[in-house]
Image (spheres, rainbow, N blue to C red):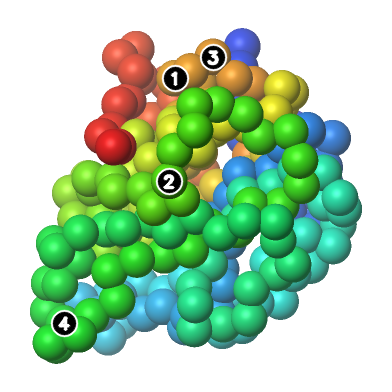
Amino acid sequence: MKPYYSDDLVTLYHGDCLAETAWLGADVLVTDPPYGMGYYLHSRAGKNAAVEVAGDHDTTARDSALAAWGKKPAMVFGSWRNEKPKCDQVIIWDKGDEAALGHPTFFSAFEEIYVIGKGWNGPRRANVIRANGLARGGAERKAYGHPTPKPTGLMELLVSYAPDGVIADPFAGSGATLVAARNIGRAAIGVELEERYCELIAKRLSQQAFDFGDAA
């Protein structure tokens, strides 16, 4: 299949990652798949304008992609609410108090990142990461029009720990993994099911200025 977008570092395909399998030739998986949250973003414009995450009714898409990926290194986002894949470590992404927007007293302000396989390297640090920019209600969602974007700075940090080789993201979404890989000079291959998000990713990647985010 012809790429939807391609440059010196990043190649993006439009389609189902189980059918468009170029990403399986990469070396390290860093992805934010649908993980069974039934995510549904309501809109003031009414139900017909609400945004859903495709395939988010269960973990089938995630689990099928991981089965196809095999035993190569992977970092995969998920939630404590659902069964996690077999992994070697769990990173906690602490979204901070801003995640409380519209939520009751005790709100979920973190997501899990499952680290699979060996070869991850970088400075020693705790497995709790505090990053600015939110997946829900934050500036990145407003800027990119995707319901669950990840902060570019967070993805840069994760990718910086990846073993050598090409980064794969078969659930490219708003393109944060691909942009992060490009920003730090790593080659990457992405696949995205929805064409409107492929267009968004292509626009982000074609910008002359690098797209930076914050992470700590």
Mark 2: which secondary structure? loop
Q: Residue at x 53, y 67 (%)?
A: 78
Q: Which mark is residue 5?
A: none
Whichever of callouts 3 and 2 sits on the residue coming sooner in the sequence is 2
Circles 3 and 1 in contact, beta carbons < 8 Å: yes
The residue nearer to you, when weighing 14 against 86, is 86
What residue is shown with label 2?
A: 126
How far from the left and from the top, in percent, is residue 44? Answer: 13, 78
Q: Nearer the viewer, mark 2 or mark 4?
A: 2
Q: Which residue is mark 3?
A: 185
Residue, x 41% and y 65% (percent of image)? 111
Would you name the residue on which mark 4 appears? 103
The image shows residue 197 at horizontal and vertical percentages of: 46, 49
| Mark 4 Cα shell of 10 Å, populated few (<14), some (14-19), many (≥20) | few
The circle on residue 183 is: 1
Secondary structure of the residue carrying numbered label 3: loop
Depth check, front residue: 76 or 210: 76
Where residue 64 appears, as percent x and y from the top left, is 79, 67
The CA span between labels 1 and 4 is: 34 Å
**Alpha carbon of mark 2 to alpha carbon of mark 4: how far?**
28 Å
- How crowded pointer 1 is (Cα within 10 Å; few <14, some 14-19, many 20+) is rated as some
The disc labelled 4 sits on which kind of residue? Answer: His
Choose the circle earlier in sequence order: 4 or 3: 4
Q: Earlier in the sequence, mark 2 or mark 1?
A: 2
Q: Position of residue 216 (x, y in %)?
A: 28, 37
Residue at image point 37% right, 60% down:
148
